[in-house]
Image (cartoon, rainbow, N blue to C red):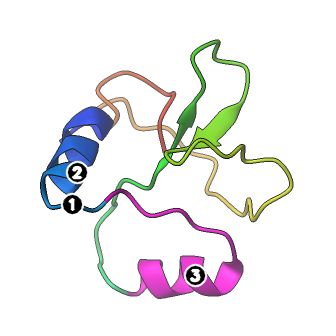
Amino acid sequence: MVFTEARRTCLTWISDLVIISSEDENNFISHLTDTNVWIGLQNNSSGDTFVWVNGSSLGDAFSNWQNDTDSETSGGNNNEV
């Protein structure tokens, strides 16, 4: 499943992809599943910065992300998290 499909599925259920703002939230989410999941972070339209699905910028928020890319799960697009 690619990012857009994951988000569309969430929106169908009147929800959205998770926005993580702290290490505690990140730990909570990571302990819910043993598989990779999409979170609500993607490049903005100009591709120069990451923004959350609610429109807020990544800025100085929590950013302890794994530095890895997997073109198979990202559909070849490294603009979503």
Q: Which mark is residue 58?
A: none
Q: CA distance from mark 3 to mark 2?
A: 21 Å
Answer whether labels 1 and 2 touch (C-beta < 8 Å).
yes
For image coordinates 35% across by 34% down, the residue present is 74
Residue 21 magenta-highlighted: yes
| Secondary structure category for the residue under label 2 | helix
- Residue 81 at x, y = what percent? 49, 45
Q: Indicate the secondary structure of the residue bearing disc 3.
A: helix
Q: Give the vertical position of 64 relative to 51 (above or below).
A: below
The numbered dot on residue 25 is 3
Real-space Cα separation, disc 1 to disc 3, in angstroms: 21 Å
Question: Amino acid under label 1?
Answer: Ile
Three-letter code, disc 2: Leu
- Residue drawn at the location 35% of the way across and 21% of the way down: 76
Q: Is residue 27 above or below residue 19?
A: below
Of the residues tagged 3 and 2, which is closer to the observer? 2
Observer-side mark, 1 or 3, equals 1
Mark positioned earlier in the residue sequence (3 or 2):
2
Q: Label 2 crowding class (10 Å Cα cut-off): few <14, some 14-19, many 20+? A: few
Quarter of the image with the N terminus is: top left
Label 1, on which residue?
14
Q: Read off the magenta span.
A: 16-31
Disc on res. 11: 2
Secondary structure at badge 1 equals loop
Q: Earlier in the sequence, mark 1 or mark 3?
A: 1
Instruction: Say if the magenta span includes residue 60.
Output: no
Q: Specify whether 65 is left or right of 73.
A: right
- For this orientation, the residue located farthest to the top is 46
Q: Residue at x 49, y 28 (%)?
A: 78
